[in-house]
Image (tube, rainbow, N blue to C red):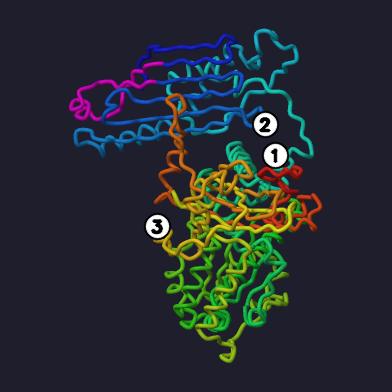
Amino acid sequence: MFVDSDTVNEFKSEDGAIHVIERRCKLDIDAPRLLKKIAGVDYVYFVQKNSLNSRERTLHIEAHNETFSNRVIINEHCCYSVHPENEDWTCFEQSASLDIKSFFGFESTVEKIAMKQYTSNIKKGKEIIEYYLRQLEEEGITFVPRWTPPSLGPSSEIVPSSKSQVASSAAVVPDTALEGLSSEALSSPGGVSEPMVGTPDDKLDADYIKRYLGDLTPLQESCLIRLRQWLQETHKGKIPKDEHILRFLRARDFNIDKARETMCQSLTWRKQHQVDYILDTWTPPQVLQDYYAGGWHHHDKDGRPLYVLRLGQMDTKGLVRALGEEALLRYVLSINEEGLRRCEENTKVFGRPISSWTCLVDLEGLNMRHLWRPGVKALLRIIEVVEANYPEMLGRLLILRAPRVFPVLWTLVSPFIDDNTRRKFLIYAGNDYQGPGGLLDYIDKEIIPDFLSGECMCEVPEGGLVPKSLYRTAEELENEDLKLWTETIYQSASVFKGAPHEILIQIVDASSVITWDFDVCKGDIVFNIYHSKRSPQPPKKDSLGAHSIASPGGNNMQLIDRVWQLGRDYSMVESPLICKEGESVQGSHVTRWPGFYILQWKFHSMPACAATNLPRVDDVLASLQVSSHKCKVMYYTEVIGSEDFRGSMTSLESSHSGFSQLSAATTSSSQSHSSSMISRWRFC
């Protein structure tokens, strides 16, 4: 409970745009009397700093404890800001941390009390904000003019707007915070906004949301915009559509940090294995076409594409023995890519967002043969890959005619399925699917497959046993698996502190073009390009012995000899480029001289920060997560001869890499520049 406060420090800028006030707040904590007696206090004190920037239209509230600060460290940060694409909305963000070092042996009790208090304040936040909004209305204040510099005077063009909407109901605002909120804060985020006119380029107008995205709360829309902007900045135009970004956000309950992490991993995975092109470049082996008992079959009552899988009729052991685990995985990926395409088509047909598909699994014929250990292992691997890269793609899973052996399979598989996905499963034993609450609730009678007593002929293959003559030896399968997943133009390399990764490119004709396309998968790196008239000596085998690098796909190569001197033995031809973790970088260099060019990826150390420029928490945490000072990059380079180069950067091979199928609609493109500078392009 808030008791009292004293102003410790206050600052106002000359133009009145910035107002910072710092208070020492006295609080009465709802804690057991014994705990208060042992601690020797009746009240605790917090220091709260409110920073209102009317020019930027933001309000930051920071608070930390003064009492017991040597035993318990509490930090809280709240931020109010204007929604980037709708000025009638206020965005609200909040974070808090609790670090209990020691507290008279009552550490766990203090933690429980703190969590209880925090949860209680979250529930009160909306009530507090609404109370002060009503108080403003009672005082006759229905809008507050937007701040303008004193020299300009009040603007006559300001139009009152409707009551501002708060974008979150989970607002923790101490009573002292509302003192500033009652008059000044509302003039920034929730104040007067200029009318917004929807245009075809306005991707988040109401019609676009209703037509392609579905119902979104203001907070969810804000999360989508922020994540999309971050992807545009780091991946330079090669980003998924809004629908797919939303899938990752929904899968992580709109936690931006978690969604961003999983999406970056998925983007890198798609790029490395060229998943974008799988429908156009990969043809399933004939064995799959003949014996994989699955296929697309119309749509359900909600307009979702319907995929039918007759798992009980499928010889999983035979398929694994004939094709291997990787071929099956690739086939399942092609099914998911086709599902994405069909969802887009159905969205156009039905005039409403269709973002997921329905899967109907018929288990008639399932037996212990399907529980063959390598087959279950392959199934678990497929589930893992699909869960990580196609979140929220499954709208509903109908499991029909589940036999007695099904609980055994379910026990093995269910722990690897996400909780949100598991809730979409409907399981029917025997002929239960024909009764009330069964198949007719989800699929029109006219398209129920004939093998389920329906009237529609289903073209899904019937499966059957794979002839043993098609089985492959273990060695053949291993080589085939290796071939499938090494068919990529990208290479991976590890970058260590003191051990950069370097590649050599020999140029015979001047005015050739060196192109590169790389992703920073882990850590931060510095990218350099050097030129030398003489070729570096082959690296020594023990040059990296101290690092014991032996992991496949994580190779490290050093070419520049330690005795070489920059400016004498080799020269820098481009300015160094610092690349952060998660960034995707493309560029080119037009060579001026023949000779040897060295592309280098070097470990980037965080510089010592000045006292007035403290490191951000995200940067510190990121630096701690780089184990053993190791970074990782995935790269592709290509040289275009001078006779083939026509000055158009859009013709370079590297510009075709990216998130092709999921891109296009939402990415803002910009013209590529033909220059010798390292560039981060956006592609049309």
Locate residue 591, reporting x and y percent: 70, 50
Q: Amino acid at mark 2?
A: Asn
- Location of residue 103 by image quarter: top left
- Residue 96, above or below 521: above
Q: Which residue is mark 2?
A: 86
Q: Residue at x 30, y 27 (%)?
A: 30
Locate residue 575, reporting x and y percent: 61, 41
3 vs 2, front mark: 3
Q: Secondary structure at mark 3?
A: helix
Kindly check if marks 1 and 2 are in contact, taking CB atoms under 8 A apart as contact.
yes
Local packing at callout 2 (Cα closer than 10 Å; few below 14, some 14-19, many 20+) is some
Which comes sooner in the sequence, label 1 or label 2? 2
Q: Residue at x 23, y 35 (%)?
A: 102
Left or right position of 499 against 200: left
Locate residue 140, reporting x and y percent: 61, 12
Which comes sooner in the sequence, label 3 or label 2? 2
Q: Residue at x 47, y 20 (%)?
A: 50
Local packing at callout 1 (Cα closer than 10 Å; few below 14, some 14-19, many 20+) is many
Disc assigned to residue 204: 1
3 vs 1, front mark: 3
**Range of residues picked out in magenta:** 23-47
